[in-house]
Image (cartoon, coloured by chain):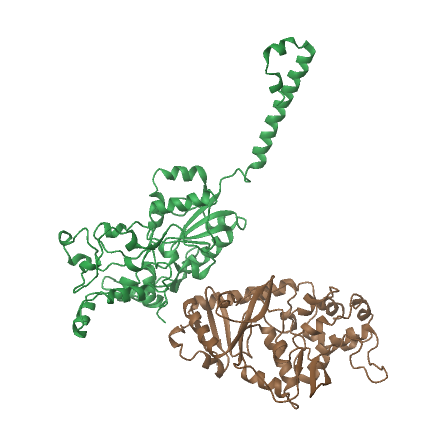
Chain colours: A brown, B green
Amino acid sequence: MAEKYYIGKAHWKSILNTWMEKYNVIAPQKEHGSLYMVPVTAENSQTIVYDEVRAVEPMKHFFIPPLTDVTGAVKTGDKPWLFLGVKACGITALTVLDQAFGGDFTDPRYEKLREESLIVSTDCAHPLETCFCTKVGGNPYPVKGFDLNLSKVWDGFVVEVGSLRGKELLEGHDRSLKEVVKEEAEALSKIRARAVREVEDFNRNFGFSAESGTALFKHYSSDFWKKDSENCVECGACTHVCPTCHCYFLDDVTKKEFVKLRGWDSCQYSGYAMTAGGGTPRPKLAERFRNRYLCKFRYLPANYDALGCTGCGRCIAACQGRIDMRETLHDLK
Amino acid sequence: MFTMQHSDQGEEENEPYYQRLIHAGLNQAFSVLESLFFITLTLYGRGRPMAKPKFAIYWAGSCGGCEIAFLDIREKILDVDKAVDLVFCPCIMDTKYKDIEAMKDGEIDVCLFNGSIRNEENLHIAELLRKKSKVMVAYGSCATEGCVPGLGNLTNAEEIQKYAFETSPSTGNPDKIRPRAETKVKGGKLTLPVMCDYVRTLGQVIDVDYFMPGCPPVADQIWAVIEAVLTNALPPKGSVVGVNPKTVCDECDREKNEKRVKRFFRPHEVDPKDIDPNLCLLEQGIVCNGPATRAGCGALCPQVNLGCRGCYGPAEGIEDMGGKLAGSIASVIDSDDPEEIERIVSQIVDPVGTFYRFSLPSSILGRKV
């Protein structure tokens, strides 16, 4: 289904307006130099950032919120979500979450939200220095997993239809859809090639790859784990911003009624997986530090048929101790 | 300052000889230092604050009229020359593209870019000049709204070339030879820029700082913009410069009453002697785009009995100029009979060419497919 169209600026406005009537459109907006996913209103619809780069919060923020009440029936908003401006790394992360919360034991909340919401992804035009998607088998532009993909070309978009629901989004806008002519296709491939080159330039000095990552197990007792984790303060930011990290704890709260809360957990905390009597499988910091890498590159691929790292670089940007995942991977390649 | 204290002649004569000698020596030393200071300033100042701002004027898909309009500011061109350093202007100077490529990013202070994006060369140079220029001005109607070349968007590159090189009545080309991107000749290959399928405005392909409409912009407005650049009094980014608010009708002195039109004329169908010089042209059945056109030209065309053609583009708040004009023209037709209305409307022979003459690529219609 490789249908592609060109939508000009004047037409895009009316398309977005019809989407806003039917859906709760969430799109990246710039604030203090970073992008945040915010609901689109009539006021801020002009300042949506379509190209640039990933937002600060990962998609799991919406599908498995930091703290959810999991008792009772599944509740959703009055309008389904339409996520505009999801990047390629965000879509890759969702495929991991889909297998974690779908699969054999389905989480009804996740499934419902995921089913009714739409993903309209966009290309990255200005990757950050922390981006390394090309190192782990990704691209700065989405190739699958979206309903629609928008690639900003000049002042319009090249729209790629990725699903039937995506095609339905364009229904009634036939007159706005122009065929993609050769200069637009050329400009698009130029923009994409430049983004790829930029990501590769940022990672010129790192010699790891997805394959060397999956072979991390042979470095299980390497001294690098201890050395690289020296700056770690166990804040758990890396796992909380990670788009694929999905470990959670369940907490029973008894107020008037019984409530079960689900919250994000982090394997970087010393209390993670602690048993009665204070037993923990990973008492040392270096062991917990190592666990995150092994989970991403070894355990998840073994269980889920997907690499746990999308190369979004959020953990690098969020780290208080300036720990760069790429350096550790480079040391252990 | 030092010499000021000793300006009193009488006192100076009373001074002992050695003191005068010291003063003279110090004075000399100061003047030497002073001149040294200025020499260093001049030397170091070259290419820095004392240098003239660098100007570039480029033509893309255009007729060259905008350059002529630029020279139309008459003797003020000498002021321009005094104030700025023209580094790139293919119309009057022989600068090569590689000279521009060799420049530092942002080295050109102001670039006036006229012409639409009709082929890949236009596109390439637009991107190049954007990189090298601090301020990019879409200069003229082609760069701002698409203008007459933009009417090519009613067809596409293939159809245009087919007509021009094969089917037009005046073409004798039995072998159907068409220009190619690359042609091998003895001693190398020749290249031609490839025609884009559709015309685009400058603002559609790069980031433009200011827009300056007009086909061409009138000389006074050009000078006003250059003056603003030289005195650093530029409006916020994205503004349309060199225009007045409101519409051409506001600048037009003709008398305006309630309009009831029974018949539309094309310019050649009406004898200039029959046109009332003081009455609104639209009331006399001459199609005038004034009601929806941005003011700034001083209503030049209506002054000479020609309906406004709309070259200054849509007035503020109008998104689609042709649609607005069609609406306003429809509202002045004096009839309730559908057949008569049909007959009156059919007197406007080329509605797209009349109402979208200058703004097709930037309008909602945009292009063919």
Q: Nearer the viewer, residue B286 or A226?
A: B286
The percent position of residue A241, horizontal first and vertical second, equals 67, 72
Q: Quadrant of the C terminus of chain A?
A: bottom right
The percent position of residue A79, horizontal first and vertical second, equals 52, 81
Residue B190 seen by the camera: no
Q: Quadrant of residue B72?
A: top left
Q: Nearer the viewer, residue B215 or B56?
A: B215
Left or right relative to A300: residue A38: left
Q: Nearer the viewer, residue B185 or B182?
A: B182
Residue A36 seen by the camera: yes
The percent position of residue B33, horizontal first and vertical second, equals 63, 26
B146 in relation to A181, above or below: above
Q: Quadrant of residue A110?
A: bottom right
Left or right relative to A323: residue B34: left
B43 in relation to B136, above or below: above
Give the residue drawn at x 72%, y 69%.
A325
Q: Residue furthest bottom?
A: A104
Q: Residue furthest front?
A: A256
Q: How many marks?
A: 0
The percent position of residue B247, horizontal first and vertical second, equals 32, 56
